[in-house]
Image (tube, rainbow, N blue to C red):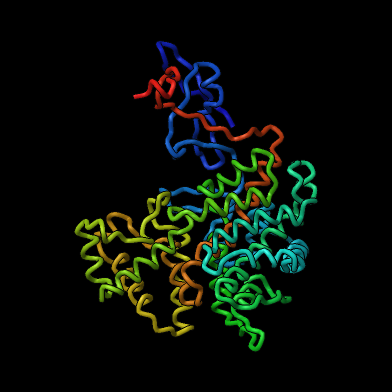
Amino acid sequence: MQSKTATLRIDDKEIALPVMIGTEGEKAVDARKLRQDTGYIFYDQGYGNTGSCESAVTYLDGDNGILRHRGYPIEQLAEHSEFVETAYLVIYGELPTQEQRKNFGNLLRENAHVETQMQRLFEGFPKDAPPMAILSSLVGALAAYYPQLATNNFEKDLQQFDLAAAIAISKIRTLGAMIYRHTRGLPFMHPKDLPFCDNFLHLMFSEPYQEYVSIPEVTQALNLILLMHSDHEQNCSTSTVRMVGSSGANLFTSLAAGVNALSGPLHGGANVAVMQMLQSIHDEGDDGTRFIAAAKSGSKGNRLMGFGHAVYKNFDPRARVIGKACGVVLNKLGKSDPLLDIAQNLEQAALKDDYFISRKLYPNVDFYSGIIFRALGIPTNMFTVMFAIGRSPGWIANWREVASNAKGRIYRPRQIFVGSPKRDYVPMAKRS
């Protein structure tokens, strides 16, 4: 939506640029014709102040701690919805009717299995291979196992989008559980006719001789964590999915790229860093007290991981919700774990100490999710895989926006070249 213009003065000339205003009042200067009209581009390292697309999926206001999916506040979804319903909302734009929810759930159940031929791919991966490296390979391989859904032709792929989306969400979940079992030398379990999260816990923790017994509080906590990660606007992995998709790449190939982007320690590895911090504190024989004092003194070696957020300048709204669930799960499981005790000490300090409050260094969603995963028995190297399972609906929704945009163009950022100017080739005999 354009209602006014901004004036830019370059080389003694005034250039009028349209101003775009979003649904929530977000404002952007439309610079799509700047290079064409002036020869200039905007330099914005890391795209932190660049709007690369128009999207109707998620609204995020970091200054005020607001997160909404398709207009619905994350707090309301956490209280009233569950992961599969929220996944449907994120992907399709509306909350499902009872019939739509049933059909979507059936599609997920029907596509939970992984073909025997595809299971053999695991034989080629060492047991100590990074789980995210395995996951990205297998998600990309879905394009080979379902070529009819991955034609790299948007019109054809969108005609079968519902099935492709269900296959992606359901199989990423199953593959995640299979990766866990492969890295431990355990036999794979077959999916059962169970709700999404109960099925995942069965695939992870059942044994041929003993079925996993569902614990309602555990299932609810896992559901909540996945829901909280279902989308988060144009983060690194989501914008990667859009970029790859903009080339005309199919859904599975684009999702594999998203998995690779998420694997980086500055993105999906944040909750891993939380656990590493807690382990380091424990190894020092500290209950968190000395660590907090050192962090307040400015010690670079005592950085609080899982506190504050690059986008939220207020309390992460997801952390408020998941923090409550964390307490419920720990109380229900009654686990004695020194790392969890340290985590609770850090949390209380951050919520009460003026040093942290004044700097808005509140616990974020990564802090709490790491604690819950550990309490559930999910190892640290599987945390980012769990993140990918939760984030798959957001990736799928964003790919669909790209594929549905008939006027879309391939993503192609510009650069400011700072290398050598033109120079002539020197024969090797004359090089000093």
Q: Quadrant of residue 21?
A: top right
User: Quarter holding the C terminus?
Assistant: top left
Above or below for 252 versus 338: above
Above or below for 290 versus 54: below
Q: Position of residue 13 (x, y in %)?
A: 44, 11
Residue drawn 53% across the image and 28% down it: 30
Q: Position of residue 258 (x, y in %)?
A: 57, 51
Q: Nearer the viewer, residue 57 or 180?
A: 180
Residue drawn 80% across the image and 47% down it: 159
Residue drawn 74% across the image and 49% down it: 150
Instruction: Specify whether 422 is left or right of 21.
Output: left
Instruction: Specify whether 269 is left or right of 153.
Output: left
Number of disc labels: 0
Q: Position of residue 163 (x, y in %)?
A: 76, 57
Residue drawn 47% across the image and 48% down it: 61
Above or below for 157 versus 173: above
Q: Quadrant of residue 302?
A: bottom left
